[in-house]
Amino acid sequence: MNNIISDICTRLNLPEKGVSAVVNLLDEGATVPFISRYRKEATGALDEVAVRNIETTLKTVRDLYARKEYVLQAISEAGAMTPKIEQSLQNATSLTEVEDIYAPFKPKKRTRATIARERGLEPLAKLIMSGNVADPTNAALRFLGKNNDITSADDALTGACDIIAEWASESSRLRNMTRNTYRRTGSLVCSPAKGKDNELENSPLATYANFSNSVRKISSHQYLALRRAESEGLIKVKFSLDETRDKLEESLANSFIPRSANSSCADIIADAVYDATKRLIKPSVENEVSTELKEEADRVAIDIFSQNLRQLLLASPLKGRRILAIDPGYRTGCKVVAIDEQGNLLDEAVIYPTPPKNDLNGAETVLKRLISKYKLNATALGNGTASRETEKFIKDYRIMDSNSIFVVSEDGASVYSASELARMEFPDKDVTVRGAVSIGRRLMDPLAELVKIDPKSIGVGQYQHDVDQSKLKNALDYTVMSCVNAVGVDVNTASASLLSYVSGIGPALAANIVKYRTENGPFRTRRDLKKVPRLGDKAFEQAAGFLRIAEGPEPLDNTGIHPESYHIVKAIANMLGVKPAELPANNAVLDRIDPVKLATQGIGGQETIADIVTELRKPGRDPRTDNADTAFHPAIESFEQLSIGMKLPGVVSNITAFGAFVDLGIKENGLLHISKISTRRIAAVSDVLRLGQQIEVTVSDIDYPRKRISLSMI
C-alpha cells in the first residue's frame, strides 16, 4: 500500500497525508463528493478535482501493480527470474514497460521462430549472435544432418535469422527506439479508399480524403474523425516515417549487433533486424502508437463532453413559473402541454400554426385559453423541426411576452419519452405528450429532468460514439453525480432518477426512498431517512449532507451542513449567545465567527467551521441561480438573411476541442473556431465560453451550397 500511495503522490504531485486519507476513505466506501465536502480536515482540504484524480489514478496504479505481480510470478515459475529482471519490474512505471519485460517469456503462438527452434536451429542463432563465427555458412552446414527438413546452409541460416529477428522484436531497447521515432517524426497519412471518391466527396468527413499530420501534432478530434472515416470504409490510414525510415532500421541494427561481432555475423544479424523491424517491431509499435493516440483522443473528447454536460446540468432553473411547453412540428402539428410550478401536467393540446395547415387563428385561441386558464407565465419551445416558425407565430400574435419565451434543446427528449421511466410517470399518455412535458421540465429544472436521460443522448459531445464507451459512461455518471451533489436534492420532491445520483444512494435505495415517501408521507427530518429499508448508517453518512428537507422542524436540514456537525452549530450558537435557529441568514451574527479561533478551542475543524458559516449565510441556496440566463432574441430568421461581416447575437450550443457551435436563431448553427474566439492564445474553448452563454459574433464566411457558417469574435 505504501508503494501505491507514493506512486500516486509522484504522479499527481500531491501530499502523502492527503492522498493516504483519500485512498483509505475510498476503500471504506466513501464517494468523491462526500470526501471533498465533509472530510477536509483529513485530506488537507483537497478539492473535488484532486480527490477524483486520486480515485482514477488509484485504479491505474493498482492495475499496474497487479500486472507486475502476475508477470513476476509467471517469469519465476518459468525459472527465468534474475535479480536484474526483478529490479526492472519494480522500477517499471507503466504497463508498456512491464509488457516489454515480459515479452521474451510470454507464451507464444506458433511463429517462424518457433518452427526454427523445433528444427533445432536455436544453437546456430546463438552462435551467430556471439559474433565470433568466422564462417556462418560453414557453421550452418553442421545442422543439416540433425533434421531432415533442413536441406541447405541457406535454409539453416534463414531459420536462425527468424530466431534472431524474434529476439530483436522482444528487445525493449529496440522497441523504445522505434516508439520514440514514431512519436517524434512519424506521420499519419490518409488516402481515399478504392471506389469511395464520390461517397467521400459528399461526406462530412471529406476533409480527411488526403489528410496528413504528424503524430506529435494531430489533435484529438482529427484522430477520432479519421478513425471514423476509416471504419466507414471511406479512407485508408497508414503511418509514414518518410526519410527517417532507413535511419531507424540502421540504428536498430547497429544497436543490436554485438560490438565484437565480425563482419560476416554482423551482416546476418543486420538482415535479421531489418526483417524484424518491418515484420514485427513496426506493426506492433504502430498498434501501440495508435492505442496511445486513441486513448489521448478519448480522454480529451470525454473531458469536453463532461465539461459540457456539467454546464448543461448546472444551467439556471426557472423556478416558480407555470410553463407552456411546446414540441413543434409541421404535418403532425405542435404538441402543447401546460405544467405547474412542480412540473405536474395540467393539460395538453395540439395546434397547427405551421405548414401545411397554417391554422394560426385556431392555434392562437388554444394557447391563449391555456395561458388564461392555468395562469401560465413562461414558454418552453423545443428547438427541433418547425421551432423558428412556431416562435415567430408566438411573437407575432403576442401569445406571450418575448422575455418569457425560451428555446430549449430537444436532444434526448425522444429517448426519455419512449423510456420505461416515462411510461411509469405518464402511463396513459403517448410519446408526444411525454416529450413536450420533458421540454417544459428542462426549463424549470434542467438537472432534475436531464438525469432521466442517458447522458450520451443529450447532444453536447464530440465523437461520443467513437470513444471508449466504458470510460465515457464512467466519466459521465461521475459528472452527473458531482452536479447532483453540488446542488443538493429535496428528498421530498426528487424523482428516483435524481435520488439515485446522491452520494451513497444508488438506484435500489432511491426506489426505497420514493416508496417510503409515498406510503408514509414527506420526511420531516433527515433522521427519518434511517427508517427507509436498507438505508443503513453508512449510506446515511454518505447521503445526508446532500439531501434537503425544506420545511421541517430542523432548519439545518435545509442546508449543506452534515448532521454529524449539528453539534458544532449548537456550540457556536451557545458561544454567541443566540439560539441555533437564529443563525441562518443572520450575517451580523455570522460575521463574529472566527473559524481559526474556534478550531483552536476544539469546537471543530477549521475547514468544517468555515463551510458551516458559508452554508448559514445562504440557507437553501441553489448555486445554479448565480449565472441565470435571460431569453435569447435572435436578430435573423433564415439562412438567406446572412451576409459576411454581419454582427449577430448568438447562444453557445456546443463546445468542442476545435471551437464552439453557436445558435443564431436559425436552423443552421455557426462554427466559431478556437482561433477566432480571442486575440490571445487560449488552451481550451471552455476557458472562455460556456454552454448557454449569449455572445456577439461576426459572420466571417458563408458556404452557401453546404449551408455552413463561419463566425468570429475578434
Image (cartoon, rainbow, N blue to C red):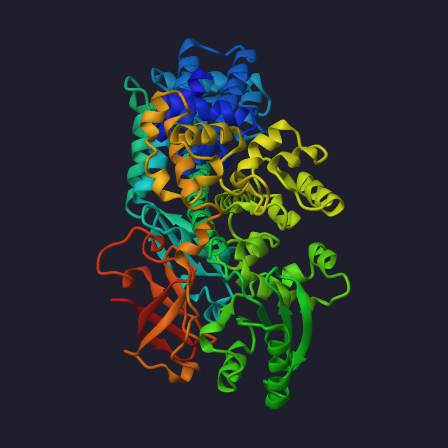
User: Does the image show residue 446?
Assistant: yes
In this view, 366 is above or below 283: below
The residue sitting at 56% across, 63% down in the picture is 411
In this view, 325 is above or below 152: below
Quarter of the image where the C terminus is located: bottom left
The residue sitting at 48% across, 11% down in the picture is 81
At which x and y percent is residue 494?
62, 50
Q: Nearer the viewer, residue 74 or 112?
A: 74
At which x and y percent is residue 177?
33, 32
In this view, 605 is above or below 321: above
Q: Nearer the viewer, residue 282 or 310?
A: 310
In this view, 617 is above or below 577: below
At which x and y percent is residue 703?
38, 76
Within the image, what quadrant is residue 609 found in? Answer: top left
Q: Nearer the viewer, residue 180 or 485?
A: 485
At which x and y percent is residue 550?
56, 47
User: Does the image show residue 156?
Assistant: no
Within the image, what quadrant is residue 645 found in? Answer: bottom left
The residue sitting at 32% across, 56% down in the picture is 688
Q: Residue furthest left?
A: 679
The residue sitting at 67% across, 38% down in the picture is 509
Within the image, what quadrant is residue 341 found in? Answer: bottom right
Q: Residue 335 vs residue 210: left or right?
A: right
